[in-house]
Image (cartoon, rainbow, N blue to C red):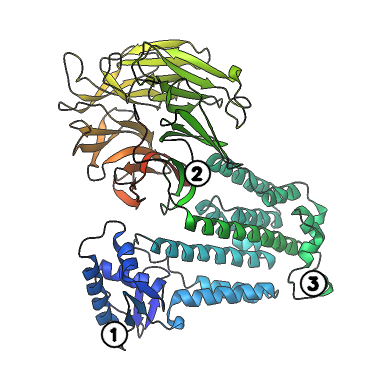
Amino acid sequence: MEFRILGPLEVLEDGQPVALGTLKERLVLGVLLLHANEFVSRERLIDDLWGEAPPPTARKAVNVYVSQLRKALGRAGDPIATASGGYRLHVDPERLDASRMEVLVANSRQCVSKGELENAAERFEEALSLWRGPTLAGLQLESRGRDEVARLDELRLAALMDRIDCDIALARHEQVLGELNVLVREHPLRERLRAQQMLALYRAGRQAEALEAYAEARRTLVDDLGIEPSEPLQRLQQAILRHDPSLETPEGTAAVNGLAPTAVESTPPAEPADVIMRRFRPRRWQLALAVLVLLAASASAAAILSTSAAATRRVLPNSLVRLDSRTGKPTLVVPVGNLPGAIAITPKAIWTVNSGSDDVSRYDLSTHKVVTRGLTPGQPNDIAFDREGNAWITNITANDEPARSSIITRLDAGIGGTSGGTVYPSHSHPIHVPLPFAGLEALGAERLWVIVGPHGPVPGDNRVGVIDLRTDRVSVLHLDESATSIAFAYGLVWIGTYGANRPPYVDDNRLEVFRPGDAKPTKIILLRHGANWGPTWIGAGDGAVWALNCSPGCGTAPVITLMKIDPETLQIVHRRDLSHLNPGSISIGAGAIWTGNINNSISKIDPRTMKIVRTFPLGGQTRQLCELAPTRTALWITVGNRVCGTVGS
């Protein structure tokens, strides 16, 4: 009997597929095959099948699933042994594609170490041919099984890059360019792939395109992560730029990569140095291989460090967390201030507003240090950055009481302001706006738009403070109703309102849409009557404006609806009930809508179909997911301590 997990789960007997029964039975078999010939506890199976919310009958159900699998697989004897509190699936390693693949990859790498590049390329290709798609495609594991699946998929990519190294060394650069272009699009942050693409283009006589490939890599890294390319990639770019003559020798290769020649000459260590030097010839392909090996080594070391660190990362209260947007797994946990809320992402840093400690935290993407400062006279509420890099921080009074006017702090870009050093008093500017609270804000049309919401209801919550970014001049826009949320998108200001606290007590839930300079808005009624609060969130993306509503009010058992609005016709084109998720925060980006749910999980929603793609559990009872901010490759969240930052917290 043959078992296949490198793709959709398959079991073959005499070349014919074996029927495997229900989805849960297939999940159990998938977990057992990920740990073939190892003990797997019943609790581990329960975790991977149901996550943190197993049914009361979970143990009994697992026993039933295993019993059914025994019937399906037991034609030549029962392969599933029962151990104390768990099971062990006996599989001949030659009959499991994952085991065969790992042996082939190890053998291929041995061939590379011996200089047998042709044999290595062939064995890598044989290993890669065992994959029929993503590991256990179609089966969604809920716990540690995800890590095992990710490990195998990562091994496939590593083997693929190893094979490309061999092909480039064997002067097959023209053949691999098409494949590399696809891989770079799929994995834009993999510097090793970028280096392979640059070297293949350079060897093909396409220097200008090699340099453009570097420029694109740098743009992606700076835009998504706020970091510069690694030093090896920068050195490779400089060498290509100047046609460095040392690229023709192993010694030059070492110099380009910032290493002494002996670092290259000592590989492999088992051979005398003179044998190694005789093996090298001053050929460009050897330069390519040497550079790629150095990049691969640094990438592998980084991957090992990242993996080992990620294995111990736990989501902590009062922290900024970066999640893998594909798996939902935390890849970075950074302690910040107390009760962090709003997030702002800049090319150099991630900022959080901490209402529990009345301060703002700045996480530097280069140094990985956190600096927390009190920058406002009261409790900070929201933060946004304009195109010049200036920070705008709204706040409420220290005693949480409405005021005749509120203060918005503008922090100047650069040294003395938004940089990681000391804040100069001359670079921090308080601006008074006639609002009882300075709540949520939006930037657009060279203006900052500020509302009282989400605070209220209070007198004056129908005003919008408008600050001219060029002059700091303040004006006020008056609404008919109370404001609860705001966004600027498609050249328009979108403000969520409701009218239950003022005569004539029209309890509609609306969007008021202004074009900058207009005195009166266009009103879109989202919920007619029975709404005692306005839209809790407005966002834009994927060609639409999105509004989140809860009725009646946002108290016990609310009906929560996500609405999609056409920004040209101002018509509602789709509604989706999200009451079962009960989202407390929501954001849009990276091709999806993300909701932070009350049960400490995150859901990913397809903006085109409005279907829920996946839900990632975070778990934990001593922390509360507060805000979300997606980038193209990651999802940043803030996590509070039991609660999120609110007025009076």
Could you tell me which secondary element the residue under label 3 belongs to?
helix
- For marks 2 and 3, give the one nearer the viewer: 2
The image position of residue 549, as x and y in percent, is: 25, 33
Residue 8 visible at all: yes
Rendering coords of residue 595 (x, y %) = 33, 42
Q: Amino acid at mark 1?
A: Gly
Query: Residue 557's image quarter?
Result: top left
The image quadrant of residue 584 is top left
Residue annotated with mark 3: 276
The amino acid pointed to by label 2 is Val
Q: Quadrant of residue 366?
A: top right
Q: Residue furthest bottom?
A: 76
Q: Is residue 10 above or below residue 223?
A: below
Residue named by callout 2: 334
The residue pinned by badge 1 equals: 74
Q: Of the residues under marks 3 and 1, which one precedes in the sequence?
A: 1
Seen at 66% across and 72% down, the residue is 112
Determine whether, in the image, residue 421 is placed left or right of residue 128: right
